[in-house]
C-alpha cells in the first residue's frame, strides 16, 4: 500500500486525515473517483496535497483565487508545486497597459512561433514551470479553458477538485453563452452587409433548438466572418513587423481591434462547444428584456466527460457540502462502481455554535409579505441582544435585504449600496468597525468571518435559487431533490461562516418557519455535526 505518511506535507497528521488517506491508499488501485465529504476542520487541503505528492503528476483545482492563495500560503510554491491563474492576471512586459491575455505575442498565432520576450514573460515563464512541475494549482475557469484549447497541457495522473459541490455551476458557467443581435451589431457592425439587416436585428422570442436553429447557424456564419475579418485587420496593421517589435503607439491603436477580436473569438469558441453537444440537453430561451437568446447546458455529464474525464487517471472530489452524493455521481455521469465515498464529520464542538430556530412565518413567495415584518422585529431583538458583537444576516435575496435595511433602521447594518461595491470592500469596512452587522444575500460561501468578525448570524429565508432562471426552473421540475439539495448546500455553507476553527464560537438564528420541515425531510443528507447544532427543532 502507498506510504501516505511519507507524502504528508506537515509533521503532524490528524486522526481524520489519517483515516481518509488510509482509505484512499487502500483503494488507489481499484477505484477511479474518490468522493470526499469532509466537514470543516478535517484539513482537506493537506489531504489533497498528500495525494498530489504521491501521484507525482497532479492538478489541484480551486474555485476562488482566495482558496488558491490559501494553498500557496499553506504549502509555499517551488519548482514542483506551481500556482497559475488566467493570463489576464499577469502584466505584459512589452506594454504595461496590456495584460498577457492581449499581449502582442497573441498576434503571432498564424506564424506559430513565439517572441523572445516569452522567456521573461510572467505568464509564459510560469506556464513553462507549471508544465514541468509535478503539481499544478489552478482554478476551474483556467483548467476548462486550457483543456478546450488543448495543445500544451497533457493529461495527468490526478485531478483534485476542491469545493467540488460547485463543479456543476462551474461547468455551466464555462459553457453558457448568449447571442444578442442588437449588441453584436452595435459592437461589430455584424449585420452591416446583410441583405435584410432589419430581419437580423429582430429580438429572439422563440424557445428551443428547432425554432432557432436556422437563425443560430446564420449568426454563427456572420460571427465566423467577423472573427476572420478582425484577425486580417490585425495582421494588416502588423505588416512585416514582429509583434514584439511594435512601438507603444501602434500597440495602443491596435489594442481596441485586438480586444474586439478576443471577445468574438471567445464567443465563437463557446458556440463551437455547443455544436458538439446534444442540443436537447440545453436550455435555449429568449431574454425578453434585451432580445438575446441564452444557451445554457441543462446537464453537465457530457461537459465533464469532454473537459475533465480524459484529463486524469484518478479524481479527488472534496467538499463539506456535497450532501446528495448519489445525485452528484449521476450529474457527472460517472460510474458508481468506480467511486469510493468517504464522509468525515467535523470535529468542532456543536455546543460552541448552536443553531436556534426562531420561526417568524413562512418566507415562501406566497407568504413572505406577511412574514417579513415579523422577521424585521426578530432582527431588532437579536441586534439588541448582541449589541456589542459583530455578525452577519443572510437574507436569501436583495429584496429581503433591502426590506430589513429600510425597516430595522439600525446604523450597525452594512449593506452594498451599489453594484460597484464588492463584498470584499464591505468586509474591509466591517473589519475596521466596532460592532457592525453585514446584511447580504451573497456571503453564504467563501467568506471567512473568524472569531470576533462574527459572533452571530441570522438566516432570514431558506436560500432557494431563483426560479426566474430557466435552467433552475427546468431542473427543479425534473428533480425536487436536486432543487432542495442546492438550497441545503447554501444553507449549510451559510451556517458555517462564523465558526471557523475548533476554538471559535458563534450563534445562528433561523427565522424561516419552513426550516424544520426541510431539515427533517433531508436529514439523511445533512452532516451529523450540523444536526447536533440544532436547538428548537424536533427531528422526527
Ligand atoms: S510573451 Fe511578451 S508580448 Fe506576450 S504577454 Fe508575455 S511579455 Fe507580453
Image: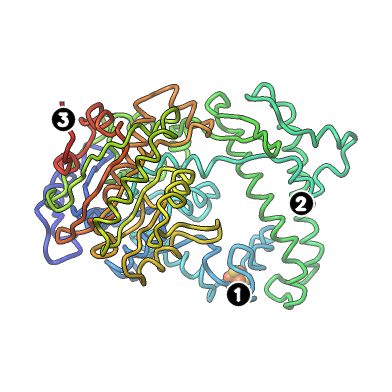
| Crowdedness near tag 1: few (<14), some (14–19) or many (≥20) residues, C-alpha within 10 Å | few
Disc number lying in front (2 or 3): 3
Q: Position of residue 331 (x, y in %)?
A: 38, 31
Q: Position of residue 141 (x, y in %)?
A: 48, 51
Q: Residue at x 18, y 34 (%)?
A: 537
Tag shown at residue 496: none
Q: Is residue 316 visible?
A: no
Distance of mark 3 from mark 1, alpha carbons?
A: 67 Å
| Crowdedness near tag 2: few (<14), some (14–19) or many (≥20) residues, C-alpha within 10 Å | few
Tag shown at residue 539: 3
Residue under label 2: 187
Q: In the figure, is residue 469 to the left or right of 158?
A: right
Residue under label 1: 116
Q: Position of residue 363 (x, y in %)?
A: 38, 34
Furthest toward the left, the residue is: 15
Distance of mark 2 from mark 1, alpha carbons?
A: 34 Å
The image quarter containing residue 370 is top left
Q: Residue at x 14, y 61 (%)?
A: 503
Amino acid at each position: 500500500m502507498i506510504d501516505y505518511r511519507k507524502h504528508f506535507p506537515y509533521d503532524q497528521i490528524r486522526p481524520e486525515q489519517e483515516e481518509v488517506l488510509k482509505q484512499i491508499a487502500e483503494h488507489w488501485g481499484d477505484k477511479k473517483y474518490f468522493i470526499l465529504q469532509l466537514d470543516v476542520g478535517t484539513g482537506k487541503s493537506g489531504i489533497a496535497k498528500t495525494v498530489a505528492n504521491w501521484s507525482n503528476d497532479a492538478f489541484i483545482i480551486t474555485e476562488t483565487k482566495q482558496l488558491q492563495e490559501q494553498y500557496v500560503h499553506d504549502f509555499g510554491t517551488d519548482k514542483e508545486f506551481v500556482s497559475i491563474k488566467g493570463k489576464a492576471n499577469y502584466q505584459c512586459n512589452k506594454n504595461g497597459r496590456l495584460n498577457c491575455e492581449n499581449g502582442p505575442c497573441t498576434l503571432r498565432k498564424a506564424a506559430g512561433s513565439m517572441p523572445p520576450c516569452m522567456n521573461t514573460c510572467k505568464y509564459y515563464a510560469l506556464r513553462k514551470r507549471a508544465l514541468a512541475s509535478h503539481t499544478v494549482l489552478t482554478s476551474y475557469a483556467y483548467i476548462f479553458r486550457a483543456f478546450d484549447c488543448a495543445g500544451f497541457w497533457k493529461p495527468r495522473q490526478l485531478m483534485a477538485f476542491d469545493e467540488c459541490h460547485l463543479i456543476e455551476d462551474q461547468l455551466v458557467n464555462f459553457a453558457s453563452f448568449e447571442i444578442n443581435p442588437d449588441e453584436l451589431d452595435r459592437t461589430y457592425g455584424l449585420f452591416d452587409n446583410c441583405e435584410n439587416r432589419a430581419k437580423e436585428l429582430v429580438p429572439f422570442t422563440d424557445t428551443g433548438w428547432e425554432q432557432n436553429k436556422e437563425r443560430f447557424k446564420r449568426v454563427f456564419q456572420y460571427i465566423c466572418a467577423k472573427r476572420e475579418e478582425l484577425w486580417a485587420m490585425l495582421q494588416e496593421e502588423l505588416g512585416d513587423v514582429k509583434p514584439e517589435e511594435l512601438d507603444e503607439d501602434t500597440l495602443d491603436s491596435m489594442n481596441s481591434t485586438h480586444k474586439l477580436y478576443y471577445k468574438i473569438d471567445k464567443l465563437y469558441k463557446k458556440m463551437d462547444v455547443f455544436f458538439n453537444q446534444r442540443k436537447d440537453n440545453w436550455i435555449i430561451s429568449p431574454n425578453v428584456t434585451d432580445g438575446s437568446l441564452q444557451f445554457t447546458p441543462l446537464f453537465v455529464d457530457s461537459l465533464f466527460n469532454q473537459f475533465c474525464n480524459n484529463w486524469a487517471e484518478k479524481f479527488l472530489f472534496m467538499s463539506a457540502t456535497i450532501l446528495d452524493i448519489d445525485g452528484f455521481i449521476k450529474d457527472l455521469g460517472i460510474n458508481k462502481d468506480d467511486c469510493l465515498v468517504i464522509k468525515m464529520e467535523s470535529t468542532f464542538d456543536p455546543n460552541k455554535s448552536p443553531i436556534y430556530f426562531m420561526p417568524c412565518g413562512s418566507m415562501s413567495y406566497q407568504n413572505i409579505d406577511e412574514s417579513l415584518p415579523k422577521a424585521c422585529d426578530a432582527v431588532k431583538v437579536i441586534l439588541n441582544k448582541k449589541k456589542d458583537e459583530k455578525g452577519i444576516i443572510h437574507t436569501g435575496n436583495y429584496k429581503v435585504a433591502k426590506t430589513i435595511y429600510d425597516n430595522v433602521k439600525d446604523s450597525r447594518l452594512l449593506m452594498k449600496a451599489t453594484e460597484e461595491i464588492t463584498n470584499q470592500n464591505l468586509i474591509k469596512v466591517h473589519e475596521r468597525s466596532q460592532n457592525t452587522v453585514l446584511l447580504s444575500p451573497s456571503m453564504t460561501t467563501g467568506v471567512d468571518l473568524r472569531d470576533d468578525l462574527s459572533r452571530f448570524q441570522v438566516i432570514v429565508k431558506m436560500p432557494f435559487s431563483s426560479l426566474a432562471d430557466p435552467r433552475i426552473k427546468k431542473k427543479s421540475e425534473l428533480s425536487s431533490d436536486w432543487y432542495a439539495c442546492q438550497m441545503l448546500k447554501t444553507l449549510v455553507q451559510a451556517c458555517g461562516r462564523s465558526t471557523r476553527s475548533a476554538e471559535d464560537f458563534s450563534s445562528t438564528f433561523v427565522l424561516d418557519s419552513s426550516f424544520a420541515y426541510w431539515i427533517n425531510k433531508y436529514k439523511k443528507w445533512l452532516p451529523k455535526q450540523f444536526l447536533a447544532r440544532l436547538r428548537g427543532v424536533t427531528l422526527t
